[in-house]
Image: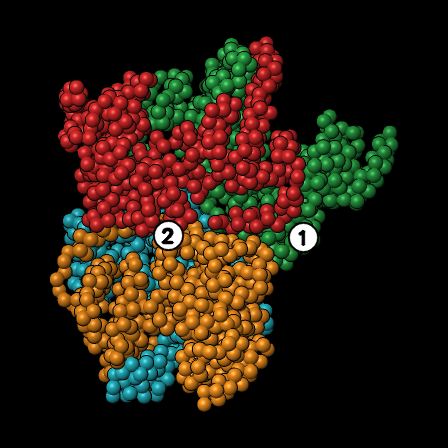
Chain colours: A green, B red, C cyan, D orange
Amino acid sequence: MFLADLLTTVFERRYLSKGADKADDRPLEALVADLIGATGEVSGQNLARQILSRYGALNDEEKRAFFRHLADGLAVSAPAVRSALEHYEKGQSKASYREFMEAVEPPRQELIRRLNQVPDATRLLVGMREDLLRLSKGDDALQALDLDFRHLFASWFNRGFLVLRPINWESPAQLLEKIIAYEAVHAIDSWSDLRRRLEPVDRRCFAFLHPAMPDEPLIFVEVALTKGIPGSIQGLLAENRTQIEADTADTAVFYSISNCQAGLAGISFGNSLIKQVAADLSLELPKLKTFVTLSPIPGLVRWLEGEGIDHGSADEDTLRKLAARYLMTAKRKDGLPLDPVARFHLGNGALVHQVHAGADLSDKGMKQSAGVMVNYLYDLEKVTQNHERFASTRTIAASPEIKSLSTAGENAFTLELSALN
Amino acid sequence: MFLADLLTTVFERRYLSKGADKADDRPLEALVADLIGATGEVSGQNLARQILSRYGALNDEEKRAFFRHLADGLAVSAPAVRSALEHYEKGQSKASYREFMEAVEPPRQELIRRLNQVPDATRLLVGMREDLLRLSKGDDALQALDLDFRHLFASWFNRGFLVLRPINWESPAQLLEKIIAYEAVHAIDSWSDLRRRLEPVDRRCFAFLHPAMPDEPLIFVEVALTKGIPGSIQGLLAENRTQIEADTADTAVFYSISNCQAGLAGISFGNSLIKQVAADLSLELPKLKTFVTLSPIPGLVRWLEGEGIDHGSADEDTLRKLAARYLMTAKRKDGLPLDPVARFHLGNGALVHQVHAGADLSDKGMKQSAGVMVNYLYDLEKVTQNHERFASTRTIAASPEIKSLSTAGENAFTLELSALN
Amino acid sequence: MFLADLLTTVFERRYLSKGADKADDRPLEALVADLIGATGEVSGQNLARQILSRYGALNDEEKRAFFRHLADGLAVSAPAVRSALEHYEKGQSKASYREFMEAVEPPRQELIRRLNQVPDATRLLVGMREDLLRLSKGDDALQALDLDFRHLFASWFNRGFLVLRPINWESPAQLLEKIIAYEAVHAIDSWSDLRRRLEPVDRRCFAFLHPAMPDEPLIFVEVALTKGIPGSIQGLLAENRTQIEADTADTAVFYSISNCQAGLAGISFGNSLIKQVAADLSLELPKLKTFVTLSPIPGLVRWLEGEGIDHGSADEDTLRKLAARYLMTAKRKDGLPLDPVARFHLGNGALVHQVHAGADLSDKGMKQSAGVMVNYLYDLEKVTQNHERFASTRTIAASPEIKSLSTAGENAFTLELSALN
Amino acid sequence: MFLADLLTTVFERRYLSKGADKADDRPLEALVADLIGATGEVSGQNLARQILSRYGALNDEEKRAFFRHLADGLAVSAPAVRSALEHYEKGQSKASYREFMEAVEPPRQELIRRLNQVPDATRLLVGMREDLLRLSKGDDALQALDLDFRHLFASWFNRGFLVLRPINWESPAQLLEKIIAYEAVHAIDSWSDLRRRLEPVDRRCFAFLHPAMPDEPLIFVEVALTKGIPGSIQGLLAENRTQIEADTADTAVFYSISNCQAGLAGISFGNSLIKQVAADLSLELPKLKTFVTLSPIPGLVRWLEGEGIDHGSADEDTLRKLAARYLMTAKRKDGLPLDPVARFHLGNGALVHQVHAGADLSDKGMKQSAGVMVNYLYDLEKVTQNHERFASTRTIAASPEIKSLSTAGENAFTLELSALN
């Protein structure tokens, strides 16, 4: 905590609060209108603080009303756009383009920017969008409003503004408790559990942070340094496992990636995380040669069931074939893989490297993928090429073994189906 | 410099460069098209790096061509806007609003955002706009293009993302050399001169920084802690002046404010600087009661000449009256003060407190204001009220003495004029 | 973690280890002799690393033998001292004084200094002394050896080398787990409990750290900001208590002070902690007027029992009188207060301000002080004077109420005793 | 600057000063006696502050008197030592050893430790010893007093307490101006010159710092990253030289090492600097294979003149032979090399690798070594072995070429001498 930051905070309580905290009993809509029209930073900051504070105390019904006001009352004016467009078409000048820009941007975008003038506002606005996403289900106007939030957030959380930071046992407790809360893949059940994932010399964790909300990780990845590619998550996380010296590891395993901010849904910044972490680690530990995930296959069981395959009695070998088949062939209408985790890693330029049965024996693991897990391999020399092929032709990169398992899976598939019939 | 940052940099040279640095001989326009169409972050980052690097090597003629390509080739498509607008008018849904948003944003905005994905891009883009401002004089299309830069920069350099930092003799040399370079009011002629403004216990300096370009101050203010309000800049900066203990000072004098980034022209963030610094200082040094500037009056002589007044023979008393008159009554067409420094401080909520003759005997000072300087007073309890009156009714807040000088100035004015006739 | 530090660590593993880790099978005593005689830093550092590593693997019996070797084999040589003393007495020159200094310092002091050349050695040596204190009970020679450790540690942990740091919820987890482990007064039973003591705006914690072992607090104090002086620890720590804004507090309560390093026993550095913290807080929060402890009275029950007083049936009023009497009159042979906590605070210049019955209802509190606690008051204007009177004349500073309670206690005392007879 | 530090400083001015700054008109000797006898930290700190402040205002005559007081009045008492020694010889108990330890340590050592309790004292005490070294010339008693300073400083500046830090263009100006001031080998004549040594990617600088005086480097080394071993300093420092990418360098050249603190003369901590820096660099830049100095030969000309050799007319080849001869054969009485720089590097385990004529054409370089310079090579695999041979048998490690030059130098030597006769 820098002095200036501290002093500012204290100051704001002492000086600014005199005006700001005076209960302004006018409706929230009036404050919003004032903020959009405010001419100066000082009065603007007071208004922003009041609105954010008032918003924080609203219940869901009131929040919905607030959003509805933004959606309806602060939208673009179609006649103004039409008029500006006509001027612009007649002559593309600075003046006509300025008129056009002003007409096509709804006032609520300027409102959001002005709310963002005060300390901690960015975090509160991300929370506001989280509310909006929750409350906008089935409400087309609120979903349209969300596009404005998303538009601004894409600018604010531009990759160039994010900072990659190692998370370890020396990190602030304030940040670590967020890691416990946000871990979405393999739950962390206590500070001791957290410590087992951060403190050993063969474990690492990295997060993207944004300077305006430094205590809130945006996305983080947990890494295990190993000899060889591990085949089960329970082995990797076992309390009594044998630690190794980091500089003897040949493999870095990305075994958990968690998005942290529901309010940043749809804002892409995770794609480069794994590659950057792989790069950092390969510099620090030159013996690292293999960068690989140990990933869940969340859609496997649902797909098998949809295909009418009873995987309950399948042996491990068959499960692996079915999993390979699923990963290589199950597609959405747009031609992309059905499995969301596969979409993420293949889209990043990884390839399907290996599948393991009996690899996740947790309830969740058994339920979603019959215990099967997959390694996606990041070959730093080939990620760009893999990515481009995947993006342009939907080609799924895979190891020869996976390809052959998938082909075999076709038979397993047929067999299973025929067994059913 | 954090480890992760360092490693990243080195990594990029080693791994990413393999692809990135391969000479891509295609025209810059082709790279730009590719970047706008890029599907993945990795290839996007490579392209961004190449474009920024290629841009850096262009001469002015080539830069103008590049900007012209953005202006003409990556503008909004009026027919697409018209079509989207019609859909939107028919039914305001998420889908129609999305179509509208996509249509009204020119591709060049997305280009600029994508260029901003790589390290140091923000600084380079600010530099790019500096070029654009220089090259767009008299060119309406390029000036329209500038509106897109400005739109994005206003979002990126939102007050909520800026950080206030003290600048002192413990600051990095890299940052300090920028202070020397950017000081625009009273030039700093050497490191020794800089040291005299930073190291004494009765001198302070504060800057706004942006996290994505931490070595580049955006705006900074230099402060002297004094007993009483000083009446001349040469006294304030005298090498042999007597230092005082900071905690015996009753007055903080803001004697120099410099904007640093030509590429951020028109992006407002200076307004709150003085007030926040005043707040910080008042907490650290509770005996500080008066927050005041010692400011140039850059337009005084020009105005006097415009009014046909020969100030050359005016005595000090007359000069003060004329200066008060100028500050209180000389207006632009829009009703705002003619003097740019007055506009800045009055717009911030300060009041005109005192004028001093013989206060700036430098060539520049004599030339622009016949040596007269002015104190603007920041009364923290009244800045909001002053600001609002100024914003709504153009009322200029002033001390009784200034008001009476200004009235007297009317006479001086008449006398001078009559003396001329 | 700075790059240089990290790199060094890695380097040491790679390069230095080649020599250092080669199993040197010679007896530990031989390595010790080599280190004392070593001529260069590199070989010295290798030896130091080996000895510290070998020591870490010893069992208690072997440690005792190691210490005995230092005690007997590396002591001062009386004949050498005698000879040097004679030379010194004949002529006090640089040469004779150098001979004297070399003779009177036992080689084990140089050994300890040389062990301290390698990273993390300071922490390991503090741990070594912790072993020594444990193993030297009843062993005069080892207790003499401890004087050498203590002599060096007093120099290394000189107040001028210590750093005061706030401990809060932003502190590294690594440091916070030490706070949990070391809290000696009111145990912290979980991370949630810790958080309740650190995160609320009306709670603070400060520690002295040493730069050479930055993850190990030496001593820390926990502070509650309150309105008025609290009368019970259970009220102060209640989970459902009402928080207050820090800047509305008028009182800072030092409710727990814990020494952390058994290996630094007898090295004084806690005395200035409270005063410095009080000073820092009074600057940050100008409304704070009262700096007070809420302290246990560990010796009260034992003393009452020694005096033959049955406190079991005493009412609260009587308990307060007896406690005041104890604090004011119970003395050791050297005239200092019998109560160790009283000795600490009175020695620091505090005064006995107030006693509270029913103030600590924990098992420990009931057992040691029948639930009574005491406030020692730090009046920053008077601590020096109080301290000096206490140091020179053993005068115990106390509030009028305590004095009158103590006098009343004399009667209670007599009554109790007479009731017993 | 951390908040706690800042607040402390301010606090001290406000609270502690009330007592401390009260003019204590007693003689300095009385304050010294008081400090040695002080019982508490608070009064001790006040006294320490007063003494250090009073000392700072003394002139040399008064300083000499102050030192004389320490030397004479605060020395060990021989009778007390004798008595303690007798007790100790009769029975080596904790009590007798404690008496012995107390008797053999002069009170002035405790004084110096107590002076070190207050902020910035360490730096002031290093300055005090600098005075003492200057004023003690020819004064045996003051030189004996210096042994006490040196004894304590050796403990305080133990290698384990030092921190290695990179110095670069991002370092605080406050630290950089010290680098300019302390550079002792190749003077830095301006901030621009400094920048040329720090900012280019193929230049580095590292310093040892002590946490208690973080703005004062203790020793620093300047490094150039090159391809191949350079043969002249003017080439290395040329303004118009061609920079190279750091990761293409194969050689790190240590071209300047400067001790910074005259008050730390005789306290060894430079030995490990080069080896640690070499280690750090070899990790960051794996292509670095050669670690070498480009060193002056300060004693060459003096030695040649002493040997009666006229080097003025010698050609470059002859100069190299003479230099090799000097480095390999010129010895002090104790068998160590005559050349101080050679003693330093050979003592560190380096070997004499190459000599270059015309390598330092500056006035100083021509005067002291006829322009000849030498490369000492640090072979990280062999430094320990080289060091040990040098330490035990005075063996000078050298490259075959140097050995052969030295032998040839014998002839050159004879020829020169015969030419003279």
Horizontal side, residue D352 vs residue D138: left or right: right
Estimate the spatial distance between the alpha carbons at disc 2 and disc 1, rounded to whole Å: 42 Å
Tag 2 and tag 1, C-beta contact below 8 Å: no
On the image, the x and y values in percent for residue C13 come to 56, 63
- From the viewer's perspective, tell me whether residue B94 is left or right of residue C369: right
For mark 1, does the 10 Å Cα neighbourhood hold few (<14), some (14 to 19), or many (20 or more) residues?
A: some
Q: Residue at x 40, y 24 (%)?
A: A51
Tell me which corner region of the image, top left, top right, bottom left or bottom right, holds residue D56: bottom left
Identify which residue is drawn at 62% across, 34% down.
Answer: B28
The local secondary structure at tag 2 comes to helix
Q: Is residue B165 left or right of residue D143?
A: right
Badge 1 is on which residue?
Answer: A289
* Residue holding disc 2: D173
Farthest-out residue, left: D25
Count of numbered circles on the image:
2
The front one of C12 and D99 is C12
Q: From the viewer's side, name the closer residue of B262 and D161.
A: B262
Q: Is residue C90 above or below residue B386?
A: below
